[in-house]
Every structure is written in C-alpha cells, then in structure tokens.
Image: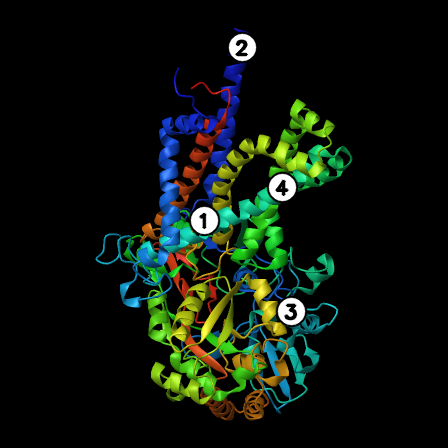
Amino acid sequence: MTKSTSLWQLRIRRFRKDRLAVVSLGIISILLISAILAQVIAPYDPASQRMSERRLPPGSPGHLLGTDGFGRDIASRLVYGGRISLMVGLVSVGVGMLIGMTLGLIAGYFKHLDNLIMRVMDILLAFPGVLIAIIVVAILGPGLYNVIIAISVFSIPMFARLTRGATLSAKEETYVLAARSLGAPTSRILLQHILPNIVSPIIVFATVRIGVSILNAAALSFLGIGAQPPMPEWGVMISEGRNFLYTSPYIAFVPGLAILIVVLSFNLLGDGIRDALDPFQSD
Amino acid sequence: MEVKKITMKKVIVAAIVLLAGLLITLPTLANDLSTLVYGADSDVQGLSPILTNDRVSSNVTDQIYDTLFVRDWNTMEIKPSLALSYENPDALTWIIHLRPNVVFSDGTPFNAAAVKFTFERLLDPKVAAPRASLLKMVDKIDVVNDLTVKITTKYPFGPFPAILTHGNSEIVSPTAVAKYGNLMQHPVGTGPFKLEEWVPGDHITLVRNDLYWGNAPKLKRIIFRIVPEGATRVGLLQTGEIDFTDLIPTPLFATLKDDPQVTAVAPLGTPIRYLSFNFQRKVFQNLKVRQAIAMAIDRKDIVTALDGLASASKSIIGPKVFGYDPTAEAFGYNHDPAKAKALLADAGYPDGFTTTLWYGVTGDYPVVAQVIQEQLSKIGIKVELKGLDWATFLSATRKGDQDMFLLGWTNLTADGEELLYPNLDSDNIGGANRAFYSNPITDRLIMVARKNVDQKVRLAALEAANAALITNVAWVPLYDQLNILAYLNDVHNLVVNPNQSWILKDVYKK
C-alpha cells in the first residue's frame, strides 16, 4: 500500500508542475523581499537629486539602471516603488476582499437581503473601475492613500458577486443542512462550514486582482491623481519619464517593464493556483 | 456566385470610401504652401476677445481682430494699428484718432461707434467679461466724430496706451454682436484672417480676410490643430504634418535643435516664474524665514532641471518689461544655505518646520516644485507637495488654502504696472494677489506708477517698488521664461513676441 497523500500535498505537487506559476511566485517573492529590505538594497535615497548626474544611461558607474531628469538613481526608485506597489496591491485587495466577501456571504445566505445588496453592487459594477476611482479621488483629493481607498471600493462588488454565487450553491449542500438541523448558530454555519468550502475561487480571484490593482494604481498616479512626486511610485516614474521618451527612453521604460513583469506574475500565479485547487484537474 | 458578387461590391465601396477619405485629408496636409498648420496644446474657450482670457484663445483671436495700438517689441514703443495716434490734452483725457477706410470682415464699417461699443461691452457688468478690470479706470467714452474717440478716465492713468495693445481690448463688429448675441462661435473682426470652420476638440481653420485694411496676408489658410501631448506635437512637426508649434517639453528642445528640417528658437520672454507665500500664515510674516527660503534656493539647479531653457532671475520685473532696471538683481538673495540655516534658527526655527507647496500640474511647475522641495529640505524645511489641476489650483490659492505656492505671470502689455498691481497690491487681495501681500509703501509706489502720465516718473516708481518687493521677499523670483518655438525650415517671417504671442499675417512658406 502506498503512503497516503493529503489533499494539500496533492495540490502543492500539482502547482509545482506549472513552471510559469513557479517562476511567477519566485518573482513575487523577490519583489516582497526587496520591498522589505529596500533600505538595505537601494544604493541611494530615492528622492535625493544630483543635478550633475542627470539622465545617465543604464550601466553607468554607480547607477545600474541610470538616473532620471533630476539625477535620481532609477534602481533605488524602482526598489522603493516596488514597496509602494505591493502595499497598494495587498491593502486594497485585502480591504476589498474583506468587505466584498462579508457582503457576498450575507447576500447569498439571507434571501431577504440578497436583492438590496446585490443591486447596489450591480450599480457599482456598472461604472468602469477607473471612473469610480476618479470620482473617489475627486471627493477625497489626490494622494496614494485615497487611491488605495478608491481601488478597494471598486474591488468590493466583484468579491461580493463571487462570494454570493458560491454561498448560494454551498448553502444547499447536505453538510450545511446537517449543521443547521443540529441547531448550529448562523454565524458558525457561515464562518466554519460555508466559508472554508468556498474560499478557493476567492483566493484565485484575489491573486489576479492584486495585479490589476497595481496596474490601476500606476494608471491613476500616471494621470497625476495618485501618488504625488517625489514618491517613486512606478506610474509617477513613467509619467515623469514621458518627456524624455525621445532622448532617454529608459527613464519611462524601466518602471513600465517592472509593472508589466509584476502584473503578469500575479496573473500567472493566479492561474497556477486555480489549476492546483481545481478538483477536476487530472493529476 | 451570388456571394462573390456581393464581395466585389463591398470591395468597390470600400475603395471609394478610402479614396474619398484621402481626398478630404489631402488639402489639410502641411506641405500645401498657402496653408500654415499650428499644433495647439488645447482647444479655445471661444473666439470673442471680450469673453475669453486665455493664451490658447487669444492665439486665434489675435489673427481675427485688431487692437487700437500695437507694441513694437524691438523699440518697445507703442505703434499705430486701428488707431493712428493719440493725444492727452490733460491727465484724464485721451483723444484717439482712428484709421479711415477700415471695415470688419462682415462689411460693417470700423469707426468711433465700434470702439465705444466694444469698450462699453467689455465694461458692462451684465456681460461679465473676465478682463473687465482692464478698463476699470474708464469713466466715459464719447464719439467726437466718425474717426475720433474721446475717453475720460476717473483718475490719471499712465499705462493707458499700453492697455490698448492688450488682446482683450480688440475691437469687435457691433452688427455681428447684434446678430449673434456674442462672438464666441461667430468671430467678426478687422484682422487679416476670418473663421472658416471650428470643429471643437479637433481643429480651427482661419481663411484670409479679403477686406483686410493692411497688406494682404501671404497665407491663404491657417489651421490650428489640437494635439494636447507635447511629445506628439514634436513628432508631428518632425514628420511635417504641422508647420509650427510651441510649449514644447524642455527635454525635446535639443532633439528639435538637431533636426536639420526644423528651426527651434528660445528667445527671452516676459513671463516670470516665482515662489511665494501665503502672508496670512504667521510663519511667513517673519522676514527672516522668507529670507532663509530665498537663500536656500539655487536657481542654477532649477535651470539645469529645465535643460537650460530658462533665464535665472532675482528681479520680479523682468528685462523685457517696462520698469526693469539691471541693478534690481543686486537686491535679490544669493544661494547661501549656511546663512539660510542661521537665519532660520534666528527666527526661532532651529530645526526648520513642515509646510506645503502648491502648484498646478502643467508645464514646468511639477519639475520646479520637486527641485525646491529638495533644496528646502537641506535647511530643514520639510515641504509636502500639493500638485493640483490648473483650475483647482487657481481657485484654491485665491481662497488662501496654500502655505507656499509656485506660479507665473505673463505680462501681456510689457508694462510693470500690469505685473505689480494685480499680483502684489492690497487692492487685489482675494483676486490675483494670491500671496495676500499688503505693504503700504509698495502700494503707494504702485499707485504712483498707475496714476501718473509722465513715463519717467512711472519708470522711477516701478523701479523703486520692484527693489522694495525683492528686498522684502514678497516673491522669490526664480526665472524668466524662454518662449520656445519650433517650425519647419520652409516657414518664414514667424516671430514669437516676448509676451508669447505671435503674428501670422506676414508669414509665408517657400
């Protein structure tokens, strides 16, 4: 008889077979470590200007990725910018997920609240995400923290809809009926029986959503309504590099490439997790 | 078989549509020698000189309408245009003799009644003209005869002829106003060109006015093509799709300089860029704090950050403006961070303080703001940047929400009075005086420059006011703007004036 394998071991084994997802996880881990250790890794203060060293090309001595229009080290700004992007992605998705999941659970389980909650969510979904973000920023004023709030707000309806759908089918399952007939309180049914069984699609969605949030935050900062200079946010860096596209294209290209790689990594990681968690996936 | 026939038809229709498209676009190409295409950074507000007050609109209206006088930028003298001469028999009276045989592009004769009509309309509170203040000293306007106007002012007003060179005093056709209500969509003036079509958000086409009183313009058409992004305009210029453009991002100027097809120039202009304070804040009422900030600024770094395309200045009134005196620079403060720190400690802030710097996110301002933030951090002042969109910035600073702010002023009349009075006189607190600056001494000097008709006295008063304002650090002047302009080599006679305006009637392509 072979040694039995737990479900999680099976899932991890399946995940490890997906090379793209593993590479993505590696990239995200590097981003995470460099974000935590930014002070140690970055050779320069990301905001300090040296007018005698403006627009040095990548590979210049002391400046691996060159310098921008103010003589600031691009590599240092990239590392600190990674910290900001990761923070925006994690916090905004975390908040959006928490609120959205709660609303979704309530809507899915309590029939009389379903219509009210989901129609409000439908209204939010009817607006393009960036438009909602611009409205929120117009009310609260520009700045990174308001962008986080804005992105959280437009993540809420998506999480709510996903959770509600899963809850609707889970609540008809026999284990829920069993718990209910044994007299379990509603809170226990929701948190201990339904939630653990519907969490997989939410995790997958959240992973992909982090990438989208980073992209949206960069877009809002590029438009000047997100992170404010001299913050080394990647969208701000692209916006400032725009005028140098003809003469020093790397100033905008480097942060652009960073956004591309990070967002792609989160998407591929999300795909990998989905395949690993899918019970119908052949081993 | 049936299916094939339809496909053939579709191909023919598509070919016809494509061909028609090509034919429509062909005449708008820049290589047509009688058409000049300008790359504009935004659409106009409208085409009435009375109801608009922004650079983009006046770029167009200046080609459609004429002022009574014009400034000769070489000699700085006031020259005739729609008016031939003026006399002022006493300090309150200006008699203006008009040019005969001039008609508006709709055939209406230009005469004293048209001048009276235009100025009274500009002053009419019901019209609510944004620059009604331009003529606020006017008491009454009388038609003496068909070609003579007598204007009486409420008090002696020295820069009066200079004001009549200002774009907002361009003369409009009274019959056109009666017909259309206003001229925002239907401009009718006496100028070298008239409106052919305006497609909002896309382009404006002007066509030669055959009734123009002066030498006939060499160009047949001018197209103002709206292309908001600076880098895109540069690309269009290099591929020959537009003939000229301005407001070019400074890093791209060098690219254009290197292009053998393009002429790129950057003459010194009247616009001044400055840093100032909200004098309602206690910390900035302390002269030592203001001096410390002035000494913390290194203008050399600012000019470098702008790719050398700025002229560092310590004088509020710039070299291209009446009232400038080269010795004024000596009243300014030189870069001296050590002394700045000492002054700050003396003022009671040995560890500096935290404050905000407000600016509009447009043009050079975001770059300059970041350089200043860095320079002030070196003397311990921690600056939080507040970059706002232009309209929000203007209204917020008018209310006094800012601590420090970054702004500029383009002197259209090139008379220092038109810089000091709106921006630094206590009359205009709550208006253009965003510093909330009030100083009885300089108020008095500015009043002398305003209410005197002797130009020598006015010059002396402006020079004295300028020196006092610099010493007192009402503003920290940073630099005078260079008016960057780039055009294809086959464009001739195109000149950018120090006040950023340009004249297109003598331009030709060869």
Which subunit holds the residue at mark 4? A
Q: Residues within 10 Å of mark 3 (few under 14, many from 20)?
A: some
Q: Where is residue A77? Give x, y as percent.
A: 36, 56
Q: What residue is shown with label 3? A: B130
Q: CB of mark 2 within 8 Å of CB of mark 3?
A: no
Residue B288 versus residue B46: which sits nearer the camera?
A: B288
Q: Amino acid at mark 2?
A: Val
Q: The residue tagged with tag 1: helix, strand or loop?
A: helix
Residue A75 versus residue B22: which sits nearer the camera?
A: A75
Q: What residue is shown with label 1? A: A86
Q: Where is residue B406? Give x, y as percent.
A: 49, 72
Cα separation between marks 1 and 4: 20 Å
Q: Amino acid at mark 4?
A: Gly
Say the numbered circle drawn on residue A100.
Answer: 4
Residue A8 versus residue A130: which sits nearer the camera?
A: A8
Which subunit holds the residue at mark 3? B
Q: Are marks 2 and 4 on the same chain?
A: no
Q: What residue is shown with label 2? A: B3
Cα separation between marks 1 and 2: 56 Å
Q: Tag 3 or tag 2, which sits nearer the N-term?
A: 2
Q: Residues within 10 Å of mark 1 (few under 14, many from 20)?
A: many
Q: Residues within 10 Å of mark 2 (few under 14, many from 20)?
A: few
Cα separation between marks 1 and 3: 47 Å
Please name the residue shown 38% across and 37% down the image.
Answer: A24
Q: How is the image coloured?
A: rainbow
Q: The residue tagged with tag 3: helix, strand or loop?
A: loop
Please name the residue shown 34% across and 66% down the image.
Answer: A49
Please name the residue shown 47% across and 61% down the image.
Answer: B505
Q: The residue tagged with tag 2: helix, strand or loop?
A: helix
Q: Where is residue A274? Give x, y as percent.
A: 48, 29
Q: Where is residue A250? Give x, y as percent.
A: 32, 50
Q: Tag 4 or tag 1, which sits nearer the N-term?
A: 1
